[in-house]
Amino acid sequence: MKATIIINPSSGKEQASEYVKKAEDILSEQGYQVTVSETAKELDATQFCTDACKECHDLVVSIGGDGTLHETINGLMDQDHRPKLAVIPLGTVNDFARALQIPLNPDQAIETLRSSQVKNVDMGKLNDQLFANVIAAGSLAEALSSVPSEDKSKLGAFAYFRDGMKELMSNSASPLKIEYDGEVWEGEAPLFLAALTNSVGGFESMVPDAEVDDGLLHCFIMTNLNMFNTLTAGLSLLLGNLKDHKDVIYFTAKHVRVSSTDPVKTNVDGEEGPALPVDLRIIPGHIRVVVPEGS
């Protein structure tokens, strides 16, 4: 058996490389021949994963944050052979790991490599790329994309919260047209969000009904978030009933198209994505993920 470990050395406050040896040891004990590939530039993880597919590896291990994971899963797209995926989360938020009950403690997550349990997990497709967790569009999404890497390392999830609150206080919005499964919504909104899992931005109660294998995009349109509404929406988020807030439109779909008459950027799995328009689809059970025994 063959396995590839893909690591981002800048994740986890520069500690990623400390965990590679332990992961290698566990995989070697299970009979894997292990290759370690360290990312140095954008899209390295995608290329490493593509190589693993072409060489018919049995397992790919992503060690890093949601950005590294996003690149890694895109290496699995359109491949005849797709290895199992294991995730060792070292990022700021780690939504995908949260949704799959993979421990956020790296040492505990590495022990998951011993697990024989595998889950078939949905992927989203945005235009010509895959995403694992969430797509956001609008002025708020642009603000979150611009959070400096240094702030993410120092402040963690608070960096996103701080910059997001600043943008919401400015009450800016974008004209959006959202077409989904035969329906159309048009209006001004600071944020459109489509999630695959229950965890978004570290809030595991944002989409409580979402499952990693339910075959649905869970979508939110925030329509009127002034300062008061921002606070009440925040409370709804913490209570797990954001979809019932009076200024939030919620729906599920298998196919969504989002466009705007203004230049509007997106945020894809926590990183800057393409500008609108975008086409979103669900790919049911596309990736096999190693999860903890009994989860």
Image (spheres, helix red, strand yellow):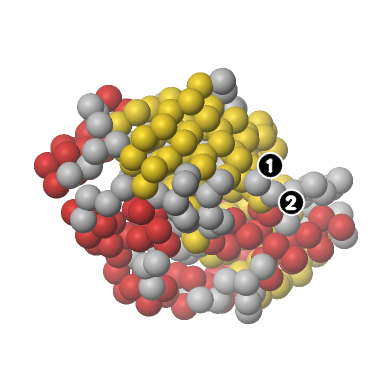
Q: Earlier in the sequence, mark 2 or mark 1?
A: 2
Between marks 2 and 1, how big is the CA–CA gap?
8 Å
Left or right: 162, with 79 as reference point: left
Quarter of the image where the N terminus is located: bottom right
Q: Is residue 29 visible?
A: no
- Please tell me in which quadrant of the rendered image residue 156 appears: bottom left
Q: Which mark is residue 223?
A: none
Which of the two residues, 113 or 245, is positioned nearer the viewer here? 245
Q: Which mark is residue 76?
A: 2
Q: Position of residue 167 (x, y in %)?
A: 26, 57
Left or right: 139, with 119 as reference point: left
Residue sitting at 48 percent across and 25 percent down? 184
Q: Position of residue 235 (x, y in %)?
A: 18, 38
Against 139, residue 159 (above or below) is: below
Residue sitting at 62 percent across and 35 percent down? 281
Mark 1: few/some/many CA within 10 Å (<14, 14-19, 20+): many
Q: Position of residue 82 (x, y in %)?
A: 78, 47
Against 57, residue 36 (above or below) is: below
Residue sitting at 29 percent across and 69 percent down? 155
Q: Which mark is residue 287?
A: 1
- Find the residue positioned furthest to the left: 228
Amino acid type of the residue that numbered disc 2 sits on in the rendered structure: Leu
Q: Position of residue 154 (x, y in %)?
A: 32, 74
